[in-house]
Structure formats: structure tokens, C-alpha cells
Amino acid sequence: MPNSTAEQILRRDTIRQLLTRAPADTQQALVDELTARGLVATQSSVSRDLKDLGAIKTHRGYELPGPESAENHEIADITGFLRSITPAGPNLTVIKTAIGAAQRVALALDRSNWPEMVGNIGGDDTVFVASDSAAGQKILIAKIERARA
């Protein structure tokens, strides 16, 4: 049974309010909170809502991205140079860029100060990025992909 647009808007507004107060440990925790407030919610609807709201999964749980910062603008500026982002093991990500752009991309990533990134090396058209963990790698890739969108 598909949700009406009004229900979906109310559910997403409520999720936004909840995540503004504190991160949610799990999608199920959000489903439980929404249900307690009388809203119809399933794990799959909450998952879609989180994606549409741009929420990210961090070590604290699901959160909305913070306010735009200078670092985020710098990342947004380099997204046009990105050609592919490929995990290469649990802690290494390979980013292919336009020819000659890898060092600029690596510098923007350095300046982002994202805690999931331990460091990177930029060549001519390839950046190797080391993450602190496999989970950190997923978060880092999600942040870059979100900047590309």
C-alpha cells in the first residue's frame, strides 16, 4: 500500500526533526519512534526517506549532513574532475580523475578534514585514499558521491 504524499512529507519532516535533535542508532529506532508518534513507517520507507533527506550513517548513527562549510565547497568544486571511485580492499579507495587533476582532488580531500580519511596520495590521474576502517571507507565514498550529486 503506497503512502500518500502528505504522509510521506510528514514522515520526512518528523525524521528531520528527530535527526536534528540526535543521531538515530538504527533505521528500526526511527521506525519505532515514528510509529509511536502515530505515523506509518517501515524499514524500507525509512531507508528511502533517509536517502532522500541526504542522511548519512556515521559512527554515531544516522545523521543529517552539517551546514555547508568551506571544505564542502572545495569538494563540490572538484567533483567535475572525478571519473570513478572504486574500493580496493577494506581501507583503500582508488579515485580516477581527469588527467592532471589528481593532486587538486587529493588536496581538496586533505582540506576536508573528514575523520574517516587517514591520508591520500595524488598522482596525475589517480588518488589513493586510505580510510580508518571498512566502515569509514563506506562513509567516505558516500560523502564524495553526495558531493557529486
Image: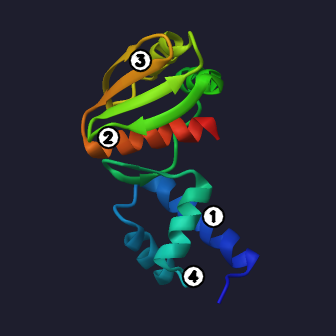
The structure residue drawn at horizontal position 24% and vertical position 40%, both measured from the top left corner, is: 133
Q: Earlier in the sequence, mark 3 or mark 1?
A: 1
The secondary structure type at the circle numbered 4 is: loop
Q: Label 3 belongs to which residue?
A: 110
Question: Which label was assigned to residue 60?
Answer: none
Query: Would you name the residue on which mark 1 appears?
Result: 13
Mark 4 and mark 2: span between their CA atoms?
33 Å
Number of residues whose C-alpha sits closer than 10 Å to that of mark 4, classed few (under 14), some (14–19) or many (20 or more): some
Q: Is residue 128 toward the left or the right of residue 43 in the image?
A: left
The residue labelled by disc 2 is 136
Q: Quadrant of residue 49?
A: bottom right
Q: Which of the two discs, 4 and 2, labels the residue nearer the N terminus?
A: 4
Crowd tier of the residue under label 1, counting other residues whose Cα lies within 10 Å: few below 14, some 14–19, many 20 or above: some
Q: Sequence order check: which comes first, mark 3 or mark 2?
A: 3
Q: Point out the residue furthest to the right here.
A: 5
Q: Which amino acid does the dot numbered 4 rest on?
A: Leu
Where residue 107 appears, x then y in whole percent? 46, 13
**Residue sitting nearer the eye, 87 or 34:** 87
Question: Pointers 1 and 2 in contact (CB under 8 A)?
Answer: no
Q: Is residue 131 above or below residue 127?
A: below
Q: Name the secondary structure under disc 1.
A: helix
Residue 73 seen in render: no
> Which callout, 3 or 1, points to the residue nearer the camera?
3
**Residue beneath disc 4:** 39
Give yes or no for contact between labels 3 and 2 (Cβ–Cβ under 8 Å).
no
Quarter of the picture holding the N terminus: bottom right
Cα–Cα gap, marks 3 and 2: 15 Å
